[in-house]
Image (cartoon, rainbow, N blue to C red):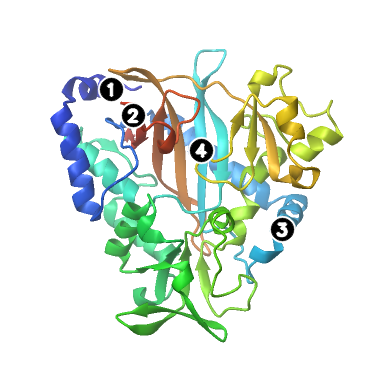
Amino acid sequence: MLEPFRTLCNNAFTDELYHELLERLDAATGTHVAFRVAETPCFFSPSLLEEMIGAGIELTKQLLENPDYMRRSSEAIPADFKVRRESAKPHFMTVDFGLVRSEDGRLRPKLVEMQAFPSIFGYQPLLAEEYRRMYRLDPELESLFAGLDDGAYWKLLGEVILGSHPAENVVLLEVDPFQQKTLPDFLMHQKKLGIAIVDVTQVVQQGRKLFYSKEGMLTPIHRIYNRVIVDELERKQIRLPFNYGDDLDVEWAGHPNWYFRISKFSIPYLQHETVPKAVFLDDFFARPDSHGLPKDRRQWVLKPLYSFAGKGIQFEPSEGDLLSIPVEDRRKYLLQERVQFEPVIRTPAGMTQAEIRILYVWPDGREMIPMTSLVRMGRGLMRGVDHNRDRTWVGGSAGFFPKR
């Protein structure tokens, strides 16, 4: 992608520079970055990124402007995790695209999935700037969208996360946060915004109010930057000190309901050239001749709707695999067309695929704003950083583009 930058990076790489990059990331975040960092940034044309950014906005609004979808997605929220006073729009959106080769030879984006949930907004700008330093990149290359520089980026992110509240009354809430691989991201939010990182099990409820311990004193929580994954709560059978359905006197930056409302659950409802064919598993069994999937089962992927980081995804599922899922659970699975992504990043280890995630915020009373991209490089079936740890020239990366 995008010469001469690709060749310059490949030629400039050394093991010493890479190890220095990792050390600088650890030092800047204040912890060890445990997931695999790719050896290189990636470079994309502004037009390709603009196509992805526009598609992500169009897909999101297509869902929000569909009354039938909004009703069905509300019904899909588990009763135990349905939270009151839902925000009118999701504060955060991530939309993932792979790249395919069209008949005319152009690279075009194809949707992988979308999620109304925060991603690593804090860590990603740091990674981009460390790549810039490592490779002495052309200052005309940018990694932030919407004309943002670092100061404007954090001001906007602070507007969404803090709302109108002092930082001491806003917390980043997660399950066992200091043991999560995303801790480097949490720490960057803490450094830039001054918010506390709080384990969801350590929250104290008094009536309708929530508190956290700060220097041994209970401090009121007025707003929650929500990073809790419900799948993890259930998998680890974690007992919370409050109920999601309680009438709590607290605001949410990233209201929990949106995690369910825009997710893999959304894909069968979308109509767009970037969207692969998809069907809920129960609908597949009810109407086996109307799903639109390829006839070749090798081109199918089975996905649980509410897993995270690629957990539970099964390629080329057999009839037995599908039948083994209990009837009452089939609505929780998606059967999707498997898309063959084009290897587009030329590296010393060979051609590599890139999955590009566009990160958006949606401030109250404003439009949906693209912030930056996250790139996951890989050469296997999965491009998540957990699935490429034993390879080189793969893992989490940052996307750059020339100024218009």
Query: Do tag 4 and tag 3 residues touch (Cβ < 8 Å)?
Result: no
Going from N to C along the chain, the mark reached first, 1 or 2, is 1
Callout 1 secondary element: helix
Q: Is any part of residue 270 visible from this angle?
A: no
Query: Do tag 1 and tag 2 residues touch (Cβ < 8 Å)?
Result: yes
User: Which residue bears the numbered disc 4?
Assistant: 96
Residue drawn at (55%, 80%), measured in percent from left and top?
Answer: 249
Going from N to C along the chain, the mark reached first, 1 or 4, is 1
**Which labelled disc corresponds to residue 6?**
1
x, y (%) of residue 386? 42, 38
User: Which residue bears the numbered disc 3?
Assistant: 74
Q: Work out whether 188 lies above or below 52.
A: below
Q: Work out whether 103 lies above or below 130.
A: above
Residue drawn at (40%, 37%), measured in percent from left and top?
Answer: 385
Please name the amino acid that badge 4 sits on: Asp
**Alpha-carbon distance for marks 1 and 4?**
22 Å
**Which labelled disc corresponds to residue 43?**
2
Crowding at dot 3, Cα within 10 Å, few <14 / some 14-19 / many 20+, comes out as some
**Alpha-carbon distance for marks 4 and 2?**
17 Å
Please name the amino acid that badge 1 sits on: Arg
The number of callouts visible is 4
**Alpha-carbon distance for marks 3 and 2?**
39 Å
Going from N to C along the chain, the mark reached first, 3 or 2, is 2
Query: Taking 359 as reference, is 262 left or right?
Result: right
**Alpha-carbon distance for marks 1 and 3?**
45 Å
Q: Work out whether residue 51 or residue 87 is closer to the camera in this orientation and state it.
A: 87
Please name the amino acid that badge 2 sits on: Phe
Going from N to C along the chain, the mark reached first, 1 or 3, is 1
Task: Give the farthest residue toward the left.
Answer: 16
**Alpha-carbon distance for marks 1 and 2?**
7 Å
Q: Work out whether residue 107 or residue 256 is closer to the camera in this orientation and state it.
A: 256
Crowding at dot 2, Cα within 10 Å, few <14 / some 14-19 / many 20+, comes out as many
